[in-house]
């Protein structure tokens, strides 16, 4: 077994706004369901991005993962609704209606921004937060590079292997089998080939960067629950300067770790390093994190 198995269950959830979201679950026999974890992927990704870590995390807690609107198995929506604020509204409704009342949030990149918004709105539900290669004070040009890479990759593919090669070039040190599984889960059949499952119009959605940066930093600074920020040592998005600037005003409940052998997608590039940082954070009592 390579530990990269897919979810043990999945469902479609219809929200009050008419958007349908995909929610997956990894569960292990004997693991209590009263304390859970919700994994939130980044821009252009899906539930599949967590395949390298979800099985191990499920030995500790009930693990759920969501496809944000416009991604994976969730509905595409009006382009004007592809903001982190609207996505956070979606996630808050899912948590309130379908998930346990004690929850750890883990968000990667855009998912980190969404998780930050959700944690600030549900402080009585969210007990811990993990932000994976996301801080509010990232440079605009670094984020632009992500958009360009995603835009270049959003094209038809003749085979799953063709897209796996794109991912392998992006994640050169990642496990090849994991890359192949993520590639297969990221595509849908169309005509005589495959296309990526996320709405390309997401890449054209514009938010005011300065406002999002300062509002996000203010939110991070006021979070009360234990919070862990992970940065890939070779991240092209979160620089050492961005991390330092975001940590300057952070409270003592916010800690950060730099993960070796990883770029922006730590959970793909170095699943072991991700787990070595996250599992002790989940197991420590709050006082030990301060």
Image (cartoon, helix red, strand yellow):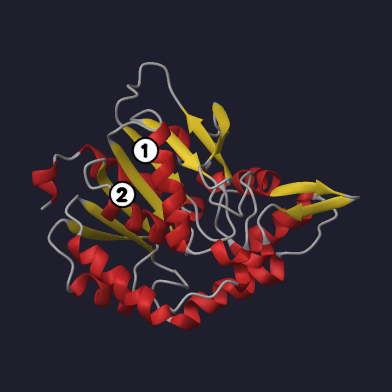
Q: Position of residue 65 (x, y in %)?
A: 48, 40
Tell me how far mark 1 sits from mark 2, CA to CA.
28 Å
Residue at image location 41% in from the left, 34% down from the top: 97
Q: Position of residue 116 (x, y in %)?
A: 33, 58
Mark 1–mark 2 contact, CB under 8 Å?
no
Location of mark 1 (residue)? 96
Q: Is residue 197 left or right of residue 103?
A: right
- Which structural element holds mark 2? helix
Residue at image location 39% in from the left, 33% down from the top: 99
Q: Residue 116 got which mark?
A: none
Q: Residue farthest to the right?
A: 192
- Residue 59 visible in the picture: yes
Tally of numbered discs? 2
- Which structural element holds mark 1? helix
Residue at image location 59% in from the left, 72% down from the top: 147
Displayed quadrant of residue 163 = bottom right
Q: Position of residue 189 (x, y in %)?
A: 81, 46
Q: Which numbered disc flags the more N-terminal residue, 1 or 2?
A: 1
Location of mark 2 (residue)? 277
Q: Is residue 161 above or below residue 213?
A: above
Residue at image location 69% in from the left, 52% down from the top: 197
């Amino acid at each position: 077994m390579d530990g990269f198995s897919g979810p043990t269950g999945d469902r479609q959830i219809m929200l009050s706004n008419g958007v349908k979201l995909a929610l997956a679950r990894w569960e292990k026999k004997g693991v209590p369901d009263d304390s859970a974890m919700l994994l939130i992927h980044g821009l252009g990704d899906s539930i599949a991005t967590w395949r390298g870590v979800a099985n191990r995390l499920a030995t500790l807690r009930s693990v759920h993962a969501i496809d944000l609107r416009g991604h994976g198995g969730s509905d595409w929506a009006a382009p004007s609704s592809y903001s982190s604020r609207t996505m956070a509204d979606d996630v808050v409704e899912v948590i309130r209606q379908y998930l346990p009342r004690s929850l750890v949030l883990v968000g990667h990149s855009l998912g980190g921004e969404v998780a930050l918004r959700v944690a600030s709105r549900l402080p009585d539900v969210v007990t811990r937060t993990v932000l994976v290669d996301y801080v509010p004070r990232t440079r605009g040009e670094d984020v632009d590079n992500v958009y360009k890479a995603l835009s270049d990759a959003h094209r038809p593919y003749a085979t799953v292997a063709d897209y796996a090669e794109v991912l392998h070039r992006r994640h050169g040190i990642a496990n090849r089998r994991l890359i192949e599984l993520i590639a297969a889960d990221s595509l849908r059949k169309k005509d005589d080939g495959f296309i990526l499952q996320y709405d390309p119009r997401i890449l054209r959605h514009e938010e005011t960067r300065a406002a999002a940066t300062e509002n996000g930093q203010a939110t991070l600074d006021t979070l009360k629950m234990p919070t862990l920020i992970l940065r890939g040592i070779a991240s092209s998005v979160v620089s050492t300067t961005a991390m330092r600037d975001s940590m300057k005003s952070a409270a003592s409940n916010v800690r950060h770790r730099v993960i070796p052998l990883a770029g922006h997608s730590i959970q793909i590039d170095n699943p072991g390093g991700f787990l070595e940082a996250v599992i002790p954070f989940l197991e420590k009592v709050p006082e030990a994190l301060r």
